[in-house]
């Protein structure tokens, strides 16, 4: 008789004390039994902790591999409540096309494989890239293998075509499914239909399209996430990235609560069932501590295909649940690169399940809380 999933969790030392919702886990088991689609059962962990133990043919995690570049520096007209434009401040500024050309050449000389290109929005949630398209085309002509992922914000068909013609490899945008969230959190006079229309325009191009859904975006409450999921399902992009809101810069007058991890787990389950043929990735952004462990465990159980920076114990959990497990030694920037290129199913190093479990059992007495004892082996 096979052990229950909750019993399996109890056997994993780093998950000691992590409380999971039994009815939700039971429903995850039932949904797993009827899982379908080519991505069912596959999971790739993007984690810097493995790079030290990687085999010689694996490159280390270079922080410059996927730099983030902002065409507006740290400026954004919207100043949404969860961000207040602070997310742009650490990025490399490139405020003119000539500066973008110079930045890209410098980054490539430092080993960059691609970049995230973004910028602050105007008051209509549009990033004003118009002057930059010729420079992007010049970059792609000079460096064809250099990948460019663009945060598009809202677009129309003409803008989407201009992005495509400039050579953009992957287009990313947040899909928001609640009008109150658009109005109150984003301070934006646009509608849910504008977000759906933007996604529709992007998927009509040849670019890879990887929308994001921010769980708990409405001040920590789940309000429009299931509607956003319906929008994504109608347009079938190349992949979907899920993140959980981390409102470090929220105003004191409108604080965010930590999203209910059980609701997050249910959303993972519903997303997997709604999109059986689309890779699903849990991105880097999510709460820390116990909430992260719970969220990541539900992500593994729900059948998500990738987790960036997993909590301790997740590789062993996925192995014990008989997932096809791979590990990519990667800092967050490289995880971004993989997510926007829609998760190559053969990426990463496949690990030996028996070795993972045996090594973890052996290391239980001396575990320090990391996954450093797991040996990575090639398939």
Image (cartoon, grey):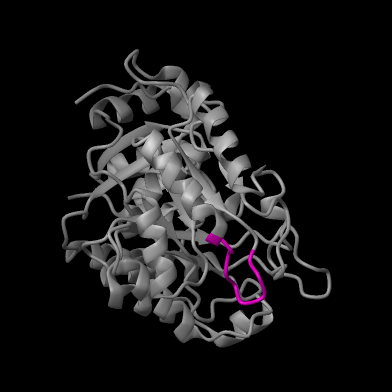
Asked if residue 58 is positioned above or below residue 344 in the image, the reply reads above
Q: Horizontal placement of 11 versus 181: left or right?
A: left
Q: Residue furthest top?
A: 56
**In the rendering, at what x and y percent does residue 94 appear?**
64, 45
Q: Horizontal placement of 179 versus 166: left or right?
A: right
How many numbered discs sit on the rendered protein?
A: 0
Identify which residue is drawn at 45% across, 86% down: 193
User: As rendered, which of 201 and 337 lies closer to the eye?
Assistant: 201
Based on the picture, tell me whether residue 244 belongs to the magenta stretch. Answer: no
Residue 370 visible in the shown view:
no
Residue 77 visible in the shown view:
yes
Asked if residue 270 is positioned above or below residue 357 in the image, the reply reads below
Q: Residue furthest right?
A: 252
**Range of the magenta residues?**
121-130
Identify which residue is drawn at 32% across, 57% down: 207
Q: Quadrant of the C terminus?
A: top left
Which is the main secondary structure of the residues drawn in magenta?
A: loop
Identify which residue is drawn at 40% across, 53% down: 166
User: As rendered, which of 80 and 307 lies closer to the eye?
Assistant: 80
């Amino acid at each position: 008789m096979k052990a229950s999933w909750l019993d399996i969790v109890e056997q994993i030392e780093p998950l000691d004390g992590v409380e999971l919702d039994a009815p939700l886990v039971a429903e995850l088991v039932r949904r797993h039994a009827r899982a379908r689609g080519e991505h069912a059962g596959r999971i790739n962990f993007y984690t810097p902790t493995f790079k030290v133990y990687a085999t010689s043919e694996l490159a280390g995690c270079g922080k410059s591999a996927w730099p983030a570049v902002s065409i507006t520096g740290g400026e954004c007209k919207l100043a949404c409540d969860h961000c207040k434009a602070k997310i742009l401040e650490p990025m490399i500024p490139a405020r003119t096309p000539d500066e973008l050309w110079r930045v890209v050449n410098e980054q490539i000389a430092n080993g960059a494989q691609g970049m995230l290109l973004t910028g602050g929005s105007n008051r209509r949630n549009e990033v004003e890239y118009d002057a930059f398209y010729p420079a992007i085309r010049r970059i792609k002509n000079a460096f064809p293998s250099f990948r460019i992922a663009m945060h598009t914000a809202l677009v129309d068909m003409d803008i989407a075509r201009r992005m495509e013609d400039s050579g953009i490899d992957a287009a990313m945008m947040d899909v928001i499914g609640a009008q109150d969230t658009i109005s109150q959190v984003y301070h934006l006079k646009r509608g849910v239909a504008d977000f759906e229309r933007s996604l529709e325009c992007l998927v009509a191009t040849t670019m890879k399209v990887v929308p994001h859904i921010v769980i708990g975006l409405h001040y920590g409450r789940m309000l429009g996430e299931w509607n956003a999921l319906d929008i994504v399902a109608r347009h079938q992009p190349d992949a979907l990235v899920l993140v959980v809101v981390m409102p470090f810069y929220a105003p004191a007058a409108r604080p965010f609560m930590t999203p209910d991890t059980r609701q997050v787990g249910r959303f993972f389950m519903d997303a997997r069932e709604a999109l059986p043929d689309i890779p699903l990735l849990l991105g880097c952004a999510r709460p820390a501590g116990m909430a992260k462990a719970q969220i990541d465990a539900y992500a593994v159980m729900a059948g998500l295909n990738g987790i960036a920076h997993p909590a301790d114990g997740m590789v062993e959990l996925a192995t014990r649940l008989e997932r096809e497990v791979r590990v990519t030694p990667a800092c967050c920037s490289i995880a971004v690169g993989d997510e926007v290129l829609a998760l190559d199913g053969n990426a990463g190093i496949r690990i030996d399940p028996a070795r993972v479990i045996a090594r973890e059992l052996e290391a239980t007495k001396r575990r320090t809380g990391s996954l450093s004892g797991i040996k990575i082996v090639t398939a």
